[in-house]
Image (cartoon, rainbow, N blue to C red):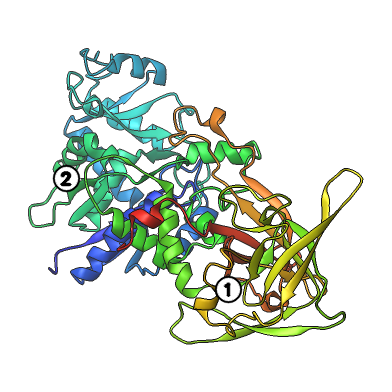
Amino acid sequence: MERIRFRFPPEPNGYLHIGHIKAICLNFELGRKYKSPVNLRFDDTNPVVENKNFIESIKKDIIFLGFKWDKESYASDYFTKLYEWAIKLIKDNKAYVDDQSQNIIKFQRKNPFEIGINSIYRNRSIDENLDLFDKMKNGFFKEGSCVLRAKINMESSNMNMRDPIMYRILQKKHHKTGYQWCIYPTYDWTHGQCDYIEQISHSLCSLEFENRKPLYNWYINQIYDEKKIKPKQIEFSRLNISHTITSKRKIKYLIEKKIIQSWDDPRILTISGLRHKGYTPISLINFVHNIGISKRNNIIDISLLEFCIRVHLNKIATRVMVVLDPIKLIIDNYPENTTEWIKAEKNPESTTIEFRKVPFSKYLFIEKNDFLEKEQENFFRLCIGKEVRLKNAYIIKANYIKKNFDGKITEIYCSYDQKSKSGKKEKNKEKGRVKSTLHWVSIKHSLPIKINLYNTLFLKKNPNIDFKKNINKKSIDKIMGYAEPFLKKAKKGDHYQFQRIGYFYVEKDKKNKIFFNKTVSIKNKWEKKIKKL
C-alpha cells in the first residue's frame, strides 16, 4: 500500500466542469480508501492559454468538493528533467528535429488506413539533432520553424505513434517560469514522465486517452529504472451530460460572443457555475456515486443531476412563500387594517422543528396562473365559485373579478372561512372540499426581490454536433418577485425552497445587494422513477 500513489492532473487552461468531478472523486476517494497520497499536479505546458486565475479556480473547486491534496506540483517544475530526457532520446537516436511545417507533418502522418511518410529530416545525425535542439532551446529559431519529434513508427495503425511531437517553440511568457524557456514540451511527452517523476502508481484518465496508452508506455520505457514504480494507465468513461457542453474551446466561444458572462456562469456546468447556481458538494458527489465508474460512454440525462441536488436541498432548504407573477387577491370579509401572524414550519424534513411567522392580511398576491375565470377540466386551482386553501392559512372562495379596459383580470375578490385556519380543522372534514393549496404573500408586507430563472442553455439533448445552432435564447429570465418578509434575513450562501416553485440560492452583486438564483424546480421526471437513490 505504501507504493500506491494517485494524482489529479488538470490543465490550467479553463475552469473545471462537471466531468472533472468524476475524476476528482475517483482519485481522491481511492487515496482515502488506501490511505495513499494524492498529488494535485498542473500540466502547465502551454503558456498561450494558461494563467494563474485558472489555477486558483481549480484549487477552489477541489476544496469546495471537500478534498485535500498531499502535494501541489506543476509540470513546469520538471522542465529541466524533461529536457535532459529529450537529449537522452536524441542520443539514443529516438528523437530528431524536424524543420517541416505543421501542415506538411500532418499530411505525412496520413490516416489509420494509409502508411505514413517519413520526414526528410528523420535520419539526421545525432550530433546535428543535438545542435539544432540546443539552438531551439536558446531562441535561435522562430515559432513554427521546427519541432522535436520522437522517432517511433510512421507505419503504425495508431496515429499517436507516428513520430509524435515532443517539443515546439513558443516564445511566450509562462505563468511560473517567465521567459526562461522558449521551447515547451507537449502534453503527451510531459504527462507520463511527470507521473514517473512523482512515482504515481495509477494514472487514472478518461477513455479519450486510451489510444494514447501505447505512447504513454513507450515514453516511460525510454527512461524507466526497474528499481522505481512504473505508472500504469487505467481508463474510465467520460461523464457526458445532456443539454450541455464541457469543451473548454466551446465555453470560451460562448464567453467571447457574450452568450454567457464568464466561466462561472450558472448556465454552464463548470463546478464554479454549479456553485453559483446553488449546487452543494454533497449533491454533486452523490450524483457521481450514483452513475458509477465504467468504460462505457453514454449521455446522462441532466434531470438525474437535478434529482440529486433536489434530494439534498429538500433536507436543508428553508421554506418560504414567493410570488413570481402576481395578481391581486382581496378577501372581502376579512377585517381591514388587520394583520394576523401565522405560524409556518421552516422545514418539515428537518430533524428539528422550527417555525417562522408569516403575515396574513386582507390584500394578497397569488400567482396569475393559479386562477382561471372559468373552471376547466383538470384545473384544480382557484376559479369563480371554487374553493382552495391558502398555504398555512384559510380556505377561500373566489366570488367575482375586476378587469381593466383590455379585458385583463386585475383583481380577484374572495371570501374566507374563518373557521378553516390551517391546523384547526380535522383533516377528514376537509377531505373532498378543497383539492389545491396555493402560496401567497401579503401585499403590505411583501419584499421585492431580484430573481434569476435558468433554463437549459441548449435546446437539444446532445448539442455538441452543432452547438452554435442549438443555443437557447431564453436560458435566463431576470424578474422581480414578491416574498414574505422572512427573506429580509437572507444572506449569501443560503438555500431556500420557494414553495410550489423551486429551490433558490442567495448571491450578491457588485453593489453587495442580494439576489436569488434558481437552482432547480420542485419536481422532474426522475421523482417517480428513482426513490432509493
Q: Amino acid at mark 2?
A: Ile
Label pair 1/2, CB-CB below 8 angstroms: no
- Give the residue number, with chain letter if any, for mark 1: 319
Question: Which badge, 1 or 2, is on the more N-terminal residue?
Answer: 2
In the picture, the disc for residue 223 is 2
Q: Residue 138, how many percent across, how many down?
A: 43, 37
Q: CA distance from mark 1 to mark 2?
A: 61 Å
Residues 525 and 189: in front is 525
Residues 451 and 350: in front is 350
Q: Residue at x 48, y 74 (%)?
A: 316
Vertical comparison of 361 with 169: above or below: below
Vertical comparison of 221 with 382: above or below: above
Residues 222 and 121: in front is 222
Q: Residue 230, how many percent across, how many down?
A: 14, 52
Residue furthest to the right:
405
Quick one: SS at disc 2? loop
Going by the image, does 422 lie left or right of 326? left
Q: Quadrant of the N terminus?
A: bottom left
How crowded pointer 1 is (Cα within 10 Å; few <14, some 14-19, many 20+) is rated as many
Q: Residue 36, how many percent across, how many down?
A: 21, 68
Going by the image, does 6 lie left or right of 511? left
Q: Residue at x 81, y 51 (%)?
A: 409
Q: Residue 394, how many percent across, how many down?
A: 67, 76
Q: Amino acid at mark 1?
A: Arg
